[in-house]
Image (spheres, helix red, strand yellow):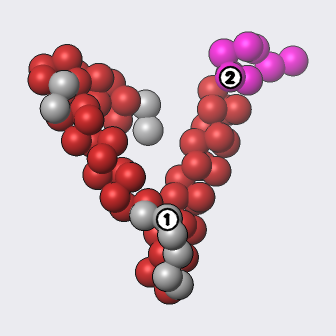
Amino acid sequence: MASWDSLITSTLSGLTGVVKAAIIFFIFANILFSTGMDPLGGIMNLVDTFLNGGVTGLLVLVVFLSWL
């Protein structure tokens, strides 16, 4: 039987893969078709939110990126 930490790690890894695939899908869909969504703008706004938070926001961004 698998341990809890390996179960959680594999679940989060799978979920991360699905989120990455969805982001890539929406970026290409926005390039090919004129959709109402702007995935690149949303990502840029998220990064701007972290960077405008000063040193704390920058540290949170580094921790967040280390999980990916």
Callout 2 secondary element: helix
Circle 1 crowding by C-alpha within 10 Å: few under 14, some 14–19, many from 20: few
| Front-most of residues 28 and 39 | 39
Circle 2 crowding by C-alpha within 10 Å: few under 14, some 14–19, many from 20: few
Q: Which residue is mark 2?
A: 8
- 59 in the magenta segment: no
Residue sitting at x 73%, y 13%: 4
Q: Main secondary structure of the magenta part?
A: helix
Do the residues bearing badges 2 and 1 touch, measured as CB atoms within 8 Å? no
- Answer with left or right where residue 60 lies relative to residue 14: left
| Front-most of residues 16 and 23 | 23
- Answer with left or right where residue 2 lies relative to residue 61: right
Residue sitting at x 36%, y 51%: 43
Callout 1 secondary element: loop
Report the span colored magenta.
1-8
* Residue 62, visible in the rendered structure: no
- Rendering coords of residue 12 (x, y %): 63, 32
Q: Which residue is mark 1?
A: 37
Quadrant of the frame with the N terminus: top right
- Answer with left or right where residue 50 lies relative to residue 43: left
- Answer with left or right where residue 17 lies relative to residue 56: right
- Rendering coords of residue 16 (x, y %): 57, 42
